[in-house]
Image (tube, rainbow, N blue to C red):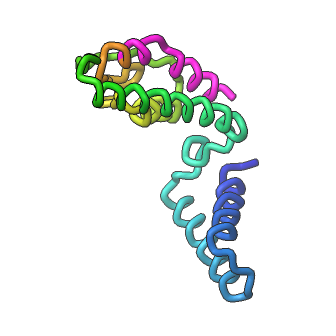
Amino acid sequence: MTPVVGLVVCLAVVWVLLSGHFEALPMILGVVSLVVCTLIARRMDVIDREGVPLHLNLWVLGYWSWLGWEIVKANIDVAKRVIDPRLPISPRLFETKTSQRTDLGQVIYANSITLTPGTVSVDLDPGVIRVHALSAEGAAEVEAGEMDRRVTALERS
């Protein structure tokens, strides 16, 4: 499926799901806005493999479920550190290498780090992400590389 067709299908599905109306006028307006948005996106030259990442399809659902669980675990850890004064808060700034080959993969990895409470991606250079972590354990979790491996596997799908 070409990125243009994929974009049109995705926009049409979102339009129908969000509007919930199947009368003639909303459907006509939906088609018009779909055509205008697609033409603008083509003119801006943003319809490509990274702009419309349809190649991630169902693989992304498995990654999202894993990431969701990691977010829950990190939330619990941060809450414990805030509530219990005996648990150390030792902020640190460090760099970690990335194994992703594309900009999209690196951005997914950096955003996943930021979504996980206790860690924030501060800077992204090709092959390296600068990360701020709330604790040494959080930094060790990022440096262990499990998230990096999973994003790389998602990128290859």
Q: Position of residue 16 (x, y in %)?
A: 69, 70
Please determine whether, in this image, residue 129 is positioned above or below residue 67: above
Q: Position of residue 101 (x, y in %)?
A: 53, 23
Q: Quadrant of residue 20?
A: bottom right
> 113 left or right of 22?
left
Q: Quadrant of residue 114?
A: top left
Residue at 36% from the left image edge and 23% from the top image edge: 129
Q: Quadrant of residue 91?
A: top left
Residue at 52% from the left image edge and 65% from the top image edge: 40
> 1 left or right of 93?
right
Q: Position of residue 79 (x, y in %)?
A: 36, 31
Q: Name the quadrant of the C terminus.
A: top right
Of residues 143 and 116, the one nearer the viewer is 116
Please determine whether, in this image, residue 112 is positioned above or below residue 42: above
Of residues 143 and 43, the one nearer the viewer is 143
Residue at 29% from the left image edge and 24% from the top image edge: 84
Of helix, strand and loop, which mostly describes the magenta segment? helix
> 52 left or right of 143?
right
Specify the segment rendered in magenta. 139-157
Please determine whether, in this image, residue 90 is positioned above or below residue 80: above
Q: Is residue 33 visible?
A: yes
